[in-house]
Amino acid sequence: DLYDATAPSELELLLEKGGWESDELAREAESGIAALHRSGLSLDNDPRRSSLGSLLDAGPTSDAAGDRPVVVVIDQPRSDDTVGFALAGPGRFSAMLQYARTENPGATIVVVMDPAAPVTGVTGHLLRRPLPAGIVGISEPVTGRSVIERADRLYTVCAHLGFEAALADIPVVCFGLAFYSGWGFTDDRLVASRRTRRRSTADVFAAAYLRYSRYYDPKTGAMIAFADALAILEREVLTERTTADPALAAPPAA
């Protein structure tokens, strides 16, 4: 399983052993990363999600934030099994927040729920209680792309958004063992001794999105390439965004 670090996964073995790399695959990965950036898509694309930048600019801290760096700390649902599979637990979230504060003096520290979490009925590890003074808590669900566009640094236990941020050249700090950590491009606070090779974000993208994953046309069931799957998803998301019930455009109050 992609998110299970309790034992070496197929993806981890691909990255550790190698032998599948090629110039053609590298070009496909470069093209795929660029297309993913252009699309603005993320792991979750619910049209009810808000923009982190808009919430920060409209909030009471907008003037204080000014030109200060924005450090985003990703909360995750207490029911998220991937936390345990990442060899982490509830205590890693409070430790992560403390380190984010200590390591980024003068920055605006913002806590948001993982954009891959459901928009309703979610209880997090950090947002479920009052945050320390000076920390901005965003209870409204936000899009993954808006987090990437606003964050100067990102802290996470194991959220998929950490990889999307790394693809956008945002410094990422990991407090759990995510599928993308331990390869040399993240700041890892939980070390995986069995991951010895140094890999780039493009390498991990090629292995995870192009070699490990399989894509199928929802209408025909035929296997398709990543680029074709992304194009289909873009059309579906555009339809959802243009036909969404206006009453659901704003997420419910937390």
Image (spheres, helix red, strand yellow):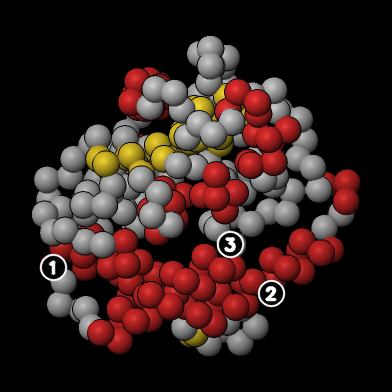
Query: Which residue, given by chain and number where applicable, does mark 1 sit on?
Result: 17
**Residue in the image at 56% along x and 68% along y:** 38
Query: Which residue, given by chain and number where applicable, does mark 3 sit on?
Result: 41
Q: CA distance from mark 1 to mark 3?
A: 30 Å
Whether tag 1 and tag 3 are in contact, CB under 8 A, the answer is: no
Indicate the secondary structure of the residue bearing disc 2: helix
From what the image shows, is residue 230 above or below residue 9? below
In the picture as drawn, the residue positioned furthest to the front comes out as: 67
Q: Amino acid at mark 2?
A: Arg
Mark 2 neighbour density, 10 Å: few (under 14) some (14–19) many (20 or more) = few
Q: Earlier in the sequence, mark 3 or mark 2?
A: 3
**Residue in the image at 46% along x and 27% along y:** 107
- Residues 51 and 8: in front is 51
From what the image shows, is residue 66 above or below residue 203? above
Q: CA distance from mark 3 to mark 2?
A: 11 Å
Q: CA distance from mark 1 to mark 2?
A: 37 Å
- Name which quarter of the figure residue 10 lies in: bottom left
Q: Of the residues tagged 1 and 3, which is closer to the observer?
A: 3
Percent x, y of residue 92:
35, 27
